[in-house]
Image (cartoon, rainbow, N blue to C red):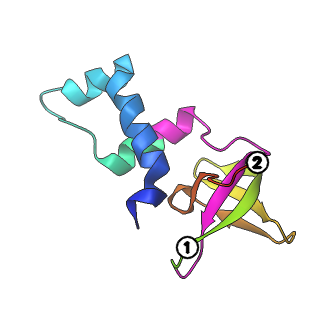
Amino acid sequence: MTSEANYVAAAAQQWAATDPLEQWVNAAPQGGKSPLEETIQEYLGEHNPFPDDSRVDVLRRDGTGWDHAKIVERTAVDEWTVEYDDGEQAWRDHHELRPSTAQA
């Protein structure tokens, strides 16, 4: 996974640094800082970084680049249905999505 594909991880880390409860949990002496994937799941439980109808870039399955699509709906905490410009739909998780870089 490239750092470009890590949009949600960056948003989750920023949230964890400013959310009072998350700061308290991470400061606990017995627990220490939460693992990144746990922080991401907690972030996604409270936030939807890809609202319905938003334009996104979707990482190609072979990792060679990005395609443009639109979010149709959020189907789970870490799963969205996307619709490509040709009408094809697919499920994708946060590792495969980022806000669109295409000019409107």
Q: Residue furthest front?
A: 103
Residue at point 37%, 51% (across, down): 37
- The residue where tag 1 is placed is 65
Is residue 20 a member of the stretch shown in magenta? no
As drawn, 74 above or below 58: above
Q: Nearer the viewer, residue 54 or 33?
A: 54
Q: Quadrant of residue 26?
A: top left
x and y percentages locating residue 15 in the rendered image: 42, 30
x and y percentages locating residue 46 in the rendered image: 55, 32
Mark 2 belongs to which amino acid?
A: Ala
- The residue where tag 2 is placed is 104
Q: Is residue 96 left or right of residue 28?
A: right
Residue at point 48%, 49% (across, down): 7
x and y percentages locating residue 39 in the rendered image: 38, 41
Disc 1 residue crowd, few under 14, some 14–19, many 20+, Cα 10 Å: few
Q: Nearer the viewer, residue 18 or 102?
A: 102
Q: Nearer the viewer, residue 76 or 19?
A: 19
Mark 1 belongs to which amino acid?
A: Gly
Is residue 60 a member of the stretch shown in magenta? yes
Q: Is residue 47 left or right of residue 54?
A: left
Q: Secondary structure at mark 2?
A: loop
Q: Residues in magenta?
A: 42-62
Gap in Å between the C-alphas at discs 2 and 1?
20 Å
Residue at point 36%, 20% (across, down): 21
Disc 2 residue crowd, few under 14, some 14–19, many 20+, Cα 10 Å: few
